[in-house]
Structures are given as structure tokens and as C-alpha cells.
Image: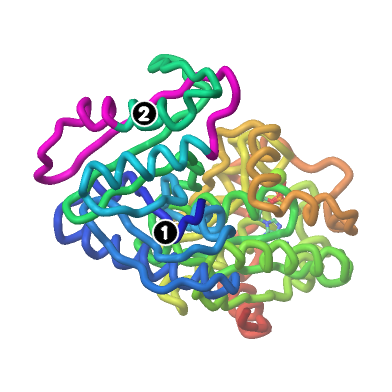
Amino acid sequence: MDFHCVMVRYGEIGIKSEQIRAKYERLLVKNIEAMLRENGIPFEDIVRERGRIFVLSGDRRAPDIIARVFGVVSSSPVAVTGTDIKDVQGTAAALGRETIGMNSSFAIRARRAGDQPYTSQEIGRMCGDAVFEAVRERNPRVDLKGPDHEIFVEMRESRSYVFSKIIKGVGGMPMGSQGKMVALISGGIDSPVAAWLMMRRGCDLIPVFFNNGKFSDKDYTERAMDTIKKLKEWAPGRTFKIYEVPHGDSLREFIDRGNVKYTCVFCKHMMYRTAIEIAKKEGAHGLITGSSLGQVASQTSDNLMIEHYRIDFPIYHPLIGLDKNEIVEIARKIGTYDISVRPATCCKAVPKHPSIHGQLEEIERIEADFDMKALARRELDGAVMTTL
Ligand code: ATP
Ligand code: MG
């Protein structure tokens, strides 16, 4: 059976006010369009109709690609017919012939929208009869509770849709509905996942990578850049502005005359300060990190507290309450995992015994002994911005 259309369902957008909803729907349509174009999938048109979006494309890849657009709850390749019940029955029967095997059970799931001469139940029964007749020689059974096959029929105002497949979408909100965020991307498993979760909630990203200079190596930078490229695949129609910030000199300075046990605390605090300057320059609304409570020394609650010392800008840690295995699961799903586990030189500035329960006095001393503002300015001045 040929499918020339993809039905797209969305969730949370639907409960917004009329105005916001229309705006978000338009964004969603734009993002679907960009996703199809970037993946070289032809389509004729995209139309919005009462809580659904229809993509006119017969390309077999279209439903899966569309399911990856943020805001999409599910997608289905659908056969389109008119509203004459005979046509609907015929289409359901054809789909039944294609999907229902020997001795198996099926159910019709019927819905209707707008004025219809039949109730959903009547549509279900009439289509069920037609399907039953179509596969009678295969000894079918009707089972509404736990059927082997489901055939969905949706009769709408001017058209009807018949389908059997529902592909789960990625969910979230349309990209671009929540402003920009600066994402601190180190290329490890966590930070790309954190950035992705915020993109899924509608944020545009400005990825920032801190290059630790002599304390690091090329492979570390490459890994971070490759995860950013992977994230870009989820951001159709967008251009990423990527900042690479020289961070090695700041670390050197701290190691030379600071309390080395606090190197990681200083490092994070410094990153925040510079990233905030980038955020202000770019009109971004916050920072995103991949911190997860207790995962490593720099992410104990004591250290997180002092790292945020005197920072008056929103910093989001979307992984804070997740376990590592949950983070890994998302990383695999979004395609960054294989890149993130590539061996790379770990940071050579990490002290042998980093502080785990950082003290407030220490960060106060850091603030007094180091001109953080000047250091942040120097890092910002040395930053290189590229586009992707
Ligand atoms: P990840 O798994 O994301 O690499 P991590 O587990 O190694 O992080 P930390 O080094 O403590 O943990 O970093 C915590 C967060 O700080 C990271 O998730 C990331 O958001 C940010 N970060 C750390 N290093 C860098 C870097 N070199 N460039 C940009 N951001 C960084
Ligand atoms: Mg981590």
C-alpha cells in the first residue's frame, strides 16, 4: 500500500492559549520542513489542521525523520481517502490485507473530528466488518483488548486517514520557542546530553568549549567538536555559533599561586564567568552544564555551591538528578555516546587530591587573590568563534 502522507501529532503545544499555540505550531512546521530538507527527503506540502500536522510525502524515510523533530509526540504514515464511508472501509480493508497474518486478531481504533454522520463506534464496526471480510480466509479474530494488529481510522472534516503504524516521537517543545542558551560542552558523556535535553525543551544552543591548552590535547578538542556536530543534526535549519575559549593560561596561573586542591573548583568558577560574558554578548538566557550530583569531585553539593559563588546568572544542570546509566541511555539514543567514549587525554591540571568538601573561605580567597574579571576578559578576548 502506498502512503503519501505523514500524520504528525504533538502534545504540550496543544494545551497552550490559541495565540501561543499557533505560534508554536508554525515553528514546528518550519522545523519539520528544515529537517526534511537537510535529510534530502522530498515533500509537496505541510498543512496544519486542528491539532495535527500533515506532511505530504510518500518517502519511506519521512515518518522516522519527522519523529526526531522536537515537539513531535508521534508520527504515522497514513493512507488518505475521502469521507465516504465506503472509501474508508475499502482503504481499511486494503491495509488489513497487507498487515494481518494467519490466525491472528485485530482491532479497529476509530476516531472522528468535526461533523460526521457516524459515531466512532459505528465507524469502528463498519470498518471492522470490511477488514474481516477482506481477510476471512486467514481465520481472523476481533480482539479489542490485546489484538495482534491495530488499524486506526480517523475521519475528519474533509478527509479520512487510515494507518497501522505509530512511531514514537522525541517529544519536547519546538526548537526556537525558548530563547538561546550557552551550553558548556566538554565532549564527555554528560555535557552533550544536558545540552540536548535543553534543546528538546525549545532552546537554541551556543556551544562553548574550554581548551585547557597544555593541560590537554588535540583529541580532547576533536571529541568535543564531534559531539557538537552530532547535536547539530537535531537542530534543523539552525547555525551554531561555537566558541572555543583558551583556558590553559588561567589554569596555569592558579596552579602556580593558588591552593591546588581547589583547581577544579577554580576551573569551573572561571568557566562560568567567561561563559556568562559570552551569554551576555549573544543575548542568551542562561548556561547549561552536564553536572550530575556526586558524580565527580567537582560535583559534590559543597563544590557546586562554592563554584556558584557570587554568580548572578541562571545556570542549568539538567542532569543533576539523573544516574549515570540513565544519562548513558540518552547519550546512546541521541548518537553522542560513541563519540564521547573515544579515548582522549584527560585534564592534566586535575590535582592528585582535589577538594571534595570545598570551603566557602577558599572561594573567597580565590576571588580576593585572582582578578577573575580580568581573567574572564582575557579568555573572552582570546576566544575563537566558528559557525557550523
Ligand atoms: P562531561 O561528562 O560532560 O565531560 P565531566 O563528567 O567530565 O563532564 P566535569 O569535568 O566536572 O565533569 O564537568 C562538569 C561540566 O562542566 C561538564 O558537563 C561541562 O558542562 C562543563 N565542562 C567541563 N569541562 C569543560 C570544557 N573543557 N569545556 C566546556 N565545558 C566543560
Ligand atoms: Mg560528568
Residue 358 shows in this picture: no
Residue 357 against residue 264 in the figure, above or below: above
Q: Could you give the CA–CA distance between mark 2 and mark 1, rounded to whole angstroms? A: 20 Å
Q: Nearer the viewer, residue 326 or 136?
A: 136
Amino acid beneath label 1? Cys
Inspect the magenta stretch and tell me whether residue 242 lies in it. no
Query: What segment is highlighted magenta in the picture?
Result: 98-126
Please name the residue shown 49% across and 29% down the image.
135
Amino acid beneath label 2? Ile
Please name the residue shown 53% across and 54% down the image.
68
Count how many numbered circles sit on residues in the image.
2
Which is nearer the N-term, disc 2 or disc 1?
1
Q: Is residue 137 left or right of residue 52?
A: right
The residue indicated by pointer 2 is 108
Please name the residue shown 83% across and 72% down the image.
213
Q: Tell me which corner region of the image, top left, top right, bottom left or bottom right, holds residue 371.
A: bottom right
User: At which x and y percent is residue 274?
Assistant: 58, 70
Q: Which mark is residue 5?
A: 1
User: At which x and y percent is residue 65?
Assistant: 55, 58
Q: Nearer the viewer, residue 272 or 220?
A: 220
Q: Tell me which corner region of the image, top left, top right, bottom left or bottom right, holds residue 241.
A: bottom right
Q: Secondary structure at mark 1?
A: strand
Image quarter hosting the C terminus = bottom right
Please name the residue shown 70% across and 53% down the image.
335
Q: Secondary structure at mark 2?
A: strand
Residue 2 against residue 125 in the figure, above or below: below
Q: Residues within 10 Å of mark 2 (few under 14, many from 20)?
A: many
Q: Nearer the viewer, residue 54 or 86?
A: 86
Residue 115 shows in this picture: yes
Q: Is residue 35 left or right of residue 172?
A: right
User: At which x and y percent is residue 355?
Assistant: 74, 40
